[in-house]
Image (cartoon, rainbow, N blue to C red):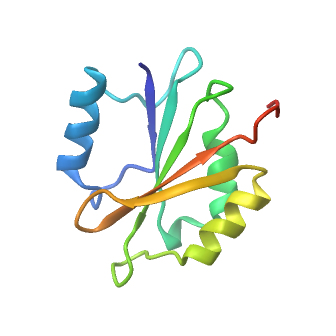
């Protein structure tokens, strides 16, 4: 499985990153040479518009691949409201499927292309 990581910075959860790499038995990559199976997108309020980040994340993503949008939890620096995330997902033409707590300071939202859509 090839997983692209975007938006890495010093504030990401190192244990979560290690768990992801252990589960895929590989390093995550920055600049892929081929389509990737999934994208991990770390996104904070100061990173700008969520829709722009999601559109950029689709560039190298395989047709059925998910984007895992990691955002800071409520009360953490860089927090993004659920409404802003939902709006960004809709504007990017994607579908929000579920959100889960994945680390002490981060939550993950699984985002997919709508069924039957093309890049």
Residue 73 placement, left or right of 103 = right
In the image, 45 versus 3, the foreground residue is 3
Residue 52 figure quarter: bottom right
Q: Residue at x 38, y 49 (%)?
A: 8
Q: Is residue 16 above or below residue 98?
A: above
Q: Is residue 5 above or below residue 90?
A: above
Q: Is residue 118 above or below residue 78?
A: above
Residue 37 placement, left or right of 17 = right
In the image, 66 versus 49, the foreground residue is 66
Q: Position of residue 111 (x, y in %)?
A: 59, 48
Q: Position of residue 117 (x, y in %)?
A: 82, 34
Q: Residue at x 75, y 60 (%)?
A: 90
Residue 21 placement, left or right of 41 = left
Instruction: Specify the quadrant that holds the N terminus.
Output: top left
Disc tally is 0
Q: Is residue 105 above or below residue 64?
A: below
Q: Position of residue 62 (x, y in %)?
A: 63, 24
Query: Which residue is the extreme one toward the top?
Result: 34
Q: Residue at x 34, y 54 (%)?
A: 9
Q: Residue at x 24, y 48 (%)?
A: 16
In the image, 119 versus 30, the foreground residue is 119
Q: Position of residue 102 (x, y in %)?
A: 30, 56
Instruction: Specify the quadrant that holds the C terminus.
Output: top right
């Amino acid at each position: 499985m090839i997983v692209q990581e975007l938006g890495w910075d010093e504030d990401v959860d190192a244990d979560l990153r290690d768990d992801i790499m252990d589960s895929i038995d590989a390093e995550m990559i920055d600049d892929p040479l081929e389509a990737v199976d999934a994208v991990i997108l770390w996104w904070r309020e100061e990173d700008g518009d969520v829709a722009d980040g999601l559109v950029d994340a689709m560039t190298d993503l395989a047709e059925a691949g998910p984007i895992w949008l990691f955002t800071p939890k409520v009360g953490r620096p860089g927090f993004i409201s659920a409404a802003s995330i939902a709006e960004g997902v809709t504007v990017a033409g994607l579908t929000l499927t579920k959100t889960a707590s994945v680390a002490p300071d981060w939550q993950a939202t699984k985002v997919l292309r709508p069924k039957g859509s093309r890049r």
